[in-house]
Image: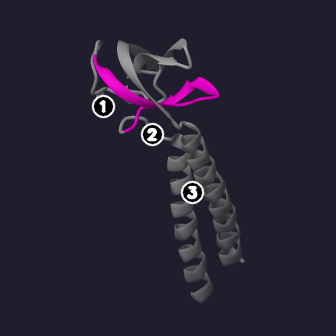
């Protein structure tokens, strides 16, 4: 009975992982237009005793100026933002919605990370289910 529960949760976790990874990859592919952006600010945000930082960038897309914060924030406990105000960096943006962009080598696609975690959990739960079944 316990092994069946482990395997059922593993199956749900695997399905969620596949959906999240596929969605993350689809989002990344939509950001297909290249641009050179200027870092105009390093924005600090605080969430419950933790500070994090993200670059705010500005670039031109389709004749209009876009100014937005990068998706990924880096905290003081982890690696800090590797850019400073005035730096020029390469970005890839969604031509249909330029406010959605990726800073290659900096931004982390959270859907892909969560999907990979779900797939790992599915593997662990499957192994536990098999072990309980054999015991």
Mark 2 to mark 3: distance in Å?
Answer: 16 Å
Stretch in magenta: 87-104
Q: Residue at x 66, y 72 (%)?
A: 7
Q: Is residue 15 above or below residue 93?
A: below
- Taking the image as shown, residue 106 lies to the left or right of residue 133, namely left
Q: Which residue carries the number 2 mark?
A: 108
Q: Earlier in the sequence, mark 3 or mark 1?
A: 1
Front position among marks 1 and 2: 2
Residue 88 in which image quadrant: top left
Few, some or many residues within 10 Å of mark 1 (<14, 14–19, 20+) = few
Near-viewer residue (101 or 81): 101
Q: Is residue 21 above or below residue 104?
A: below
Q: How many marks?
A: 3
Q: Which residue carries the number 3 mark?
A: 118
- Taking the image as shown, residue 54 lies to the left or right of residue 118, namely left
Mark 1 to mark 2: distance in Å?
Answer: 17 Å
Disc 1 element: loop
Q: Which residue carries the number 1 mark?
A: 77
Q: Earlier in the sequence, mark 1 or mark 2?
A: 1
Q: Residue at x 54, y 69 (%)?
A: 123
Few, some or many residues within 10 Å of mark 3 (<14, 14–19, 20+) = many
- Taking the image as shown, residue 96 lies to the left or right of residue 45, namely right
**Which image quarter is the N terminus in?**
bottom right
């Amino acid at each position: 009975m316990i092994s069946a529960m482990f395997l059922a949760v593993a199956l749900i976790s695997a399905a969620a992982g596949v959906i999240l990874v596929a969605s993350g990859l689809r989002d990344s592919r939509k950001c297909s237009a290249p641009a050179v952006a200027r870092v105009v600010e390093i924005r600090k945000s605080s969430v419950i005793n933790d500070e994090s930082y993200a670059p705010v960038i500005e670039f031109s897309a389709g004749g209009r100026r876009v100014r937005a914060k990068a998706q990924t924030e880096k905290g003081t406990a982890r690696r800090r933002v590797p850019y400073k105000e005035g730096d020029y960096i390469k970005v890839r943006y969604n031509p249909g919605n330029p406010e959605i962009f990726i800073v290659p080598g900096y931004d982390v696609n959270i859907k892909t990370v969560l999907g990979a975690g779900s797939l790992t959990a599915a593997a662990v739960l499957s192994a536990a289910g098999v072990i309980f079944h054999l015991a």
